[in-house]
Image (tube, rainbow, N blue to C red):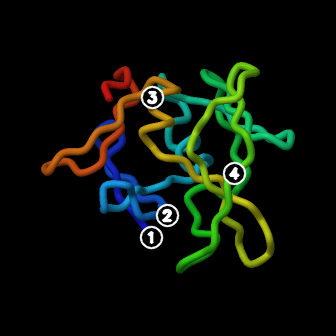
Amino acid sequence: RRQTIELDGRDVTLQTYALPGSNGGETNYVRLRDIASLLNGTNAQFGVDWDGNVIIVPDEAYKTNGTELQAPFSGDRRYQKAAKTVIYGESIPFTAILLTDDQGGGYTYYKLRDLGKVLNFNVGWSNSRGIYIESNHAYEG
């Protein structure tokens, strides 16, 4: 589904994927390349690469590949556990899922708060703002 979030005071819309959460609600997952493209040029920017593992490179400018902020599919999809995620050469135990489009292309989705925690940008929620990202504030939890 499409989800509008506040990023540094402006609204942006991206595709998210919701799974049942342990508390009975839903947990939204966001596509890694969407978040990387939105944070590009901010204090929280990071690059994305692939070598059989997902590689996140903090403080590196993101290089677009043309799939950002586009919906590669619609409706429910089967998901599988995503490949290992590596930052600074170390495997990070993210909860990430892999979804594929009708042509077999893969897209990795993460919990936004997990990314904020590891890459040190703030992610929050309030009644008045909804989901928000503050790229110039450290993660507050």
For the residue pair 41 and 53, the one nearer the viewer reads as: 53
For the residue pair 57 and 111, the one nearer the viewer reads as: 111
Q: Is residue 110 above or below residue 88?
A: below
**Residue that label 4 marks:** 82
Kindly indicate the quadrant of the structure image that contains residue 66.
bottom right
Q: Residues within 10 Å of mark 2 (few under 14, many from 20)?
A: many
Helix, strand or loop status at disc 2: strand
Q: Amino acid at mark 1?
A: Arg
Q: Residues within 10 Å of mark 3 (few under 14, many from 20)?
A: some
Disc 4 to disc 1: CB gap under 8 Å: no
Q: Earlier in the sequence, mark 3 or mark 1?
A: 1
In the image, what residue occupies the spot 61% across and 30% down? 46
Helix, strand or loop status at disc 4: loop
Q: Amino acid at mark 3?
A: Lys
In the image, what residue occupies the spot 25% across and 44% down? 125
Q: Which numbered marker is on residue 17?
A: 2
**Residue that label 3 marks:** 117
Disc 2 to disc 4: CB gap under 8 Å: no
Q: Earlier in the sequence, mark 2 or mark 4?
A: 2
Q: Earlier in the sequence, mark 4 or mark 1?
A: 1
User: Disc 4 and disc 1: Cα gap in Å?
Assistant: 20 Å
